Image (tube, rainbow, N blue to C red):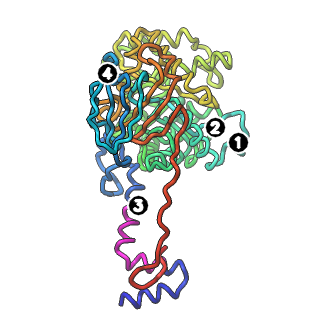
Amino acid sequence: MLKLFCKIAATTSFAAAAFATFLICPALRAQTTQADRQERWRFYSPDTPVSDDTRRVPVPSGPQGPTGTLVLRGGRIFDGTSAPAREGTLVIAGNKILKILAPGSTDWPEDAQVIDVHGETVIPGLIDLHTHLSYSNPRESPDVTGSMPEATLRGAERLRYYIESGITSVRDVASNGEVPFRLQSWVNQNRIVGPRIFAAGQFITGIGGHGDEGGLDNDPIHGAIREASGADGWRDAVRIQFNRGANVIKIGSHFSVAEVTAAVQEAHELGLKVTCDCETFYIKRAVEAGVDMIEHPLPRTDETIRLMAQKGTEADPTLIPYILIFDLSGGYYYTTSRRFTFSKDANFEVARRMKQAGIKMGIGTDLVTDWYRYLPGPYITEMKQFAKLGYTVPEVLSIATKTNAEMLDMGTKLGTLDPGKLADVTVIDGRPDENLDDIAKVDLVIRNGYITVKHGQIFVPRHLPVPMPQPCQHCGAPVP
Ligand SMILES: [Zn+2]
């Protein structure tokens, strides 16, 4: 029977032969099923307890790392906790941090890859909480920017700027359609070099709300924003992002109480945090509805700030994009309200009042148009704003790593150099815990145990050729 099937397979067309071989060859079938499952891993953030998965697929183990041991020998270790840097050697096994050795110890396997980092500072990989990997540049023709391949390539290009700046995780809080999820999948498979991507999918907003004023594509499938109306519409919009693989939900004004309440409830039931871009009374409305985080330094009352502190609502103030808007454009554009209420000082004052109230704040840059080309400058400027708010330099570095990881819901896996955590590490040829400008001196970046930046530049090892397929050893039928 097997031979007969193989004969049929060998004598019909290639596609039919491939299908027949697939049906009868258990090894090949198992391989394909495994690939399908790996592809679906993206529906999960390892730390997010998802209440139910509509596809009923087994929970995969997540992206695997390299094999072997990597040793960063003899550097200054800043572990992300804002404790003073200390001399030591970091040992990485596969994609996890194994241990920190005291100076002089050589307790690692003989075949380990050892990199000397004397005089350099080893820190947890930096995290950017607010990116838009596929946002287009309004100065470019919509005929070009509207294409999904172009949007994907824009994202791929930006990944380089982030990883070469020592940033090993980005939270993408709106990009076109499936683009952030495809980029996320390729990075996790180590098929392109870049930081980990935690994606929101589309930015959910009211009809004609924020996000729709600047020419951003509002196509319901491929757009970067998704307009919704009514409580059911907002629930649907959340479910669609979840189905695509969202790690977080991003919403923005305008919305009614019923709409924002429905969106937050739906996201929380699906195990996702919600972050909101809004201003004035909309912030209060969002906080009362239970959003987890507010983006930007937009105007809000003292009462709202008190409410945020009371409810534990976090903040990602993103002062730098507004500094750039003032410096490059002379002020805010498009919306009516921001034009009148904004100044650099007013924005800083909102951040200052949030710090004073004890609100947990993280670091994000929100680099739209082509501002990513300024990196690492904007990231360093945002860190300096935090220093200006009164945080010490080690505290700022700890916010950029440990606090940001917690705000991503990844505090148990990222953000510090504790043994057992994922090996996302940045090595700086300087002392960033003393001087934030030294962040620009990135030498080495390791993401998930892989060396992704060497001497400040993306590092891609030569590909390892896969052995060519051989015909079926039983019958000689071609293997697809
Ligand atoms: Zn943004």
1 or 2: tag closer to the N-terminus: 2
Q: Which residue is mark 3?
A: 35
Disc 1 + disc 2, Cβ < 8 Å: yes
Secondary structure found at label 3: helix
The numbered mark, 4 or 2, whose residue comes first in the sequence reads 4
In space, the residues marked 3 and 2 are separated at their CA atoms by 32 Å
Look at 35% across and 72% down and name the residue there.
27
Q: Which sits earlier in the primary sequence, circle 3 or circle 4?
A: 3
Q: Residues within 10 Å of mark 4 (few under 14, many from 20)?
A: many
Residue displayed at 41% across by 91% down: 4
Of mark 4 and mark 1, the one earlier in the sequence is 4
Few, some or many residues within 10 Å of mark 3 (<14, 14–19, 20+): few
Mark 4 secondary-structure assignment: loop
Determine the CA span between mark 1 and mark 2.
9 Å
Residue 425: image x %, image y %?
Answer: 40, 32
Q: Amino acid at mark 3?
A: Ala
Q: Amino acid at mark 1?
A: Pro
Q: Nearer the viewer, mark 3 or mark 1?
A: 3
Sequence order check, earlier mark of 3 and 1: 3
* Label 2 packing within 10 angstroms: few (<14), some (14-19), many (20+): many
Residue 33 counted in the magenta span: yes
Cα separation between marks 3 and 4: 38 Å
**x%, y% of residue 476?**
45, 83
- In the picture, the disc for residue 142 is 1
Would you say the residues marked 3 and 1 are in contact, meaning their CB atoms lie under 8 Å apart? Answer: no
Mark 4 and mark 1: Cα distance apart in space: 45 Å
- Is the residue marked 2 within 8 Å of ligand 1, measured from its CB? no
Report which residue position mark 4 lands on: 81
Residue at mark 2: 136
Point out the stretch of residues depicted in magenta. 18-34
* Secondary structure state at the residue bearing disc 2: loop
